[in-house]
Amino acid sequence: MKTTAVRLYGQNDLRLGSFELPAIKEDEILVKVISDSICMSSYKAAIQGSNHKRVPNDIAENPIIIGHEFCGEILEVGAKWAGQFKAGEKFGIQPAIQYKDTLMTPGYAFPTCGGATQYAVIIPEVMEQDCLLHYNGSAYFYGSLAEPLSCIIGTFHAQYHTKLGCYTHDMGIVEGGNLAILAGAGPMGLGAIDYAIHCDRKPGLLVVTDIDQARLDRAASIYTAEEAAKNGVKLVYLNTNCENPVEKLMELTDGKGYNDVMVFAPVAPVIEQGDKILAFDGCLNFFAGPTNPNLSAMFNFYNVHYAAHHLVGTSGGNTADMNEALDMIAAGKLTPSGMITHIGGLDAAAESTLNLPKIPGGKKLIYTHISMPLTAIDDFAKLGETDPLFAKLAELCAANNGLWSPEAEEYLLANAKPIDA
């Protein structure tokens, strides 16, 4: 089968092109990819090429398909998996396959298995690790967002606490406790807010900080204090671009501090701010993935010794986290539309990936069977003055609080220009 895909050939060398996929073997599955959201990790792989630990050395001769946050439809099932999957059903994928203790994963290492493509072969390495997942949600883009959501879910599960004199770790955030998400008004922070107020182990107080008031206002309009209160959570948004932000954060807890702190920006002052607001037995999770291998910050080791402060870090989620994300999305408990700010076609994927840090906003969502420049949702209405496609998309998004929606996706897929037209 012929497919059109974005493949990595070397450092800063992403190319859109067509090639023939091999016929699937009995232990493989052929899928039609519909949506693929762009991750900052893909940007890192694209600029580093084979210097990236997950990218093979021979990509100049055997380029790999980029992209790992994808969702779509199963087309053909090899005989080995006929009892578990069937043609026509939707799928999600856990790219962190941990295959035989290697770092090889879809979107980084395989010539036929990735997200920025019309069609892909789900290879034995994925299948043997049970990383092709059933998905019953209403929209493909929700399935794409399940992967970044699984990273967030893994962060919540990785938190731990102890009791005096007991060395058993009680995993997860403190139920009914104080949780601070620092630098949390970006796309991943929005996902964390959504999860915190809708999961089964909720904080009593959730404080979300940022230094950009516009981002905070957008977050507050998507995940409101009223919605959080319905779920038993007091939600406060705080701009820390102010005098004595640590003091203001502590005031919100009556001086007790935060049982759980999550740092969503790889910035030393934010890490140090998180250290200063921890309660006794407080757990700080450094979530943000840094590009600087020498990133360091001050941490109060007096409090590590006497106040039982501890530090954890998470990178990605496991398959259980991914299944939890897919199940919560399908049940309507998580609605991660707020993470997305831009929509584009497959012909926008290469340039968007290579320039990702320069493009403002949240997640960039690619639909792999259409041709469309990467476009901010906020620009739909203006473009709609001359383009009926964008006019209708603007109308559909306006009806959903300015956010992307299953209805907008359905309309786009039915009416946008095909990539190979």
Image (cartoon, helix red, strand yellow):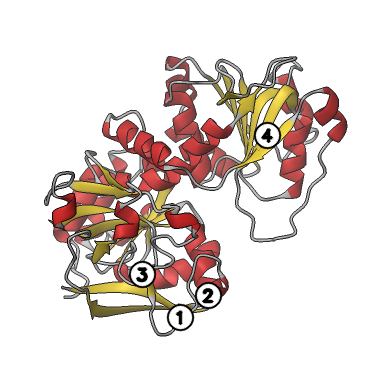
Mark closest to the chain's N terminus, 1 or 4: 1
Which residue is the site of mark 3? 348
Spatial separation of the CA atoms under disc 3 and disc 4? 37 Å
Q: Secondary structure at mark 2?
A: helix
Residue drawn 15% across the image and 73% down it: 1
Q: Closer to the camera, 62 or 390?
A: 62
Residue drawn 34% across the image and 58% down it: 125
Spatial separation of the CA atoms under disc 1 and disc 4? 39 Å
Which residue is the site of mark 4? 284
Looking at the image, is mark 3 or mark 1 nearer the viewer? 1
Amino acid carrying mark 4 in the image: Leu
Q: Are marks 3 and 4 in contact (CB under 8 Å)?
A: no
Amino acid carrying mark 3 in the image: Ala
Mark closest to the chain's N terminus, 3 or 2: 2
Q: Are marks 2 and 1 in contact (CB under 8 Å)?
A: yes
Which residue is the site of mark 2? 50
- List x then y, in percent, for residue 325: 37, 37
Q: Are marks 3 and 2 in contact (CB under 8 Å)?
A: no
Q: Are marks 1 and 4 in contact (CB under 8 Å)?
A: no
Looking at the image, is mark 3 or mark 4 nearer the viewer? 4
- List x then y, in percent, for residue 270: 72, 43
Q: Give the total number of marks visible in the rendering.
A: 4
Spatial separation of the CA atoms under disc 2 and disc 4? 33 Å
Mark closest to the chain's N terminus, 3 or 4: 4
Mark closest to the chain's N terminus, 2 or 1: 2
Which residue is the site of mark 1? 58
Looking at the image, is mark 1 or mark 4 nearer the viewer? 1
